[in-house]
Image (cartoon, rainbow, N blue to C red):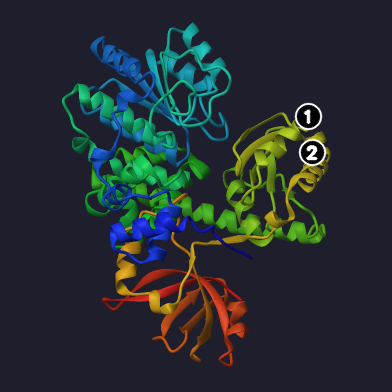
Amino acid sequence: MRWTIKPKPSEDKIKHLAQALQVEDFVATLLVQRGIETFEDAKNFFRPSLDHLHNPYLMKDMDKAVERIEAAIENQENILVFGDYDVDGTTAVSLVSSYLKTYYTNVATYIPDRYDEGYGISFKGIDFADDNGISLIIALDCGIKSLDHVAYAKERNIDFIICDHHRPGKNLPEAVAVLDPKRDDCNYPYDELCGCGIGFKLIQALGLNQGQTVEDLTSYLDLVAAAIAADIVPMTGENRVLAYFGLQVINSDPRPGIKALVHQVKKKTLDITDVVFIIAPRINAAGRIKHGNHAVQLLTEFDFEQAQQFASEIEQYNSDRKDLDKQITKEALLQLEENNEKERFTSVVYQENWHKGVIGIVASRLIETYYRPTLVFTKSGDKYAASARSVKGFDVYNALEACAQHLEQFGGHMYAAGMTLKEENYSFFKAAFEKQVQDTIHPDLLIPEIEIDAEIDFVDITPKLTRILKQFEPFGPLNMTPVFLTKNIRDTGYAKKLGEDETHLKLFVKQNGSDGIPAIGFGLGNKMELTTNQQPFEAVYCIDENEWNGKISIQLRLRNIK
């Protein structure tokens, strides 16, 4: 592990903010690192408000989108709400379709089959619309590069409204409206919304015309929060406001589908991490193992008993997904060991019967063992298909682009991508990809990094600090859980390994005569010898609250020790 302390902002900014907020300098440092420099910034950060959401009509083409939907309703046209099979896509389809159905009945939904149609708008989906007399398709979380598909639909007198958050290509599809804050000609104040977030802005605009305020639409924010958490978009600006209020809905009055999912795991209060690890994988499992339609069915069901039935089916898909993921990871690691590929700059593995729905998860698992850009291939029809995952700071999409002559097609972004190639090109591609990464990656990027917000002493860890840090939530990219470094720590002699394989570490630590603090290090069991015989060590950690028998106490969640 590389330990990197974040650059300290200017002393002037820190002092000015610390004084304005009456907080310690290191708390002000954490805020300035997150772009919060004034009292007003801090007020907005610590007190998110629905009033902070922007007017949806500031988004380019929003007026055209609303006008076309209202015309479709007036003319009794059939509307199809189309979206991708992942969490962002299925939540967006559930949100827009269930909103429209509150006042209009001719609304259908469509999720493409992951294996038959692949990602994004499909010709099969357009044919479905054509066969069913649908004249307007609202595409969510996809479509920004679907020029051919939109043209194909136009020939069949079907209009498109595109709601996407991916980066556009040189030309935009010829749709009635293209809602995407990443358009060069769109001046919307915030361009990091996820697909479901764009869907929410659309219903917000439709709602304004119905005399509804944003408060009238808060019941849809459980879906938006799930999408923000799953899509790993920055936890700043509108995303933070939407996630903050979305979590409140999840914990107080979620829709029956989400309530049924949470009901199965029996956890009282969920934070954003729980949404990432409990809700998101289950919604995703439908598209990975069976079909994304099952997720939409669950999320749009308003009878709780029926929702529980759907949730138990999805629980089974998630269980199957876990088994597959575990088995394939085991086989992939064995393959890397047998081929003696420990010294390579990349991990590239293939087996023809690996399940296509979990190879992306497997790629992420392999990075936990061999920290390097990773591709996991399986057979898909007469081609090889792969999911790519990367390490922090390395652009795997650019690396694939450099090897494009060996590929049939590829797409994605810096840290995750997908591709297909012909069987005969596999070995050529594997060699080219290895060489490309070897030539372009900085050696430091092959060592996992922990970014440290600040160095503090145990005396700084007070109930007041814990209360302040709690108000930093919800956490996510650009607002990650603060990580602290403390030196000259000693264990008080209670160190022990936990877990079936003794993979975790439990300590009770002190520094310079401070009160002892319990600490837990998941996956750090092998570091126990560094803490024995009262020898001093350094630790990087997050500050957690631990609830046991109704009592809440401070605990350190260790990230690493040395």
Instruction: Kindly report the distance in space between the C-alpha atoms of the residues bearing marks 1 and 2.
Output: 9 Å
Q: Amino acid at mark 2?
A: Phe
**Residue at (22% x, 27% y) in the render:** 207
* Left or right of 235 in this view: 68: left
Q: Which residue is mark 1?
A: 405
Observer-nearest of 30 and 91: 30
Residue at the (37%, 42%) spot, across then down:
237
Farthest front residue? 12
Q: Secondary structure at mark 1?
A: helix
Residue 101: image tag? none
Does 554 appear above or below 274? below
User: For this view, does 157 lie left or right of residue 77?
Assistant: right
**Residue 429 numbered mark, or none:** 2
Where's residue 123, x and y in %? 53, 19
Residue 113: x and y in percent read: 51, 32
Measured from the top left, where is residue 326 in percent x and y?
Answer: 59, 59
Which of 542 and 364 lies nearest the eye of the viewer? 542
Whether residue 354 is visible = yes
Residue 448 in the image: above or below residue 438: below
Q: Secondary structure at mark 2?
A: helix
Q: Residues within 10 Å of mark 2 (few under 14, many from 20)?
A: many
| Residue 109 to residue 70: above or below | below
178 on left or right of 419: left
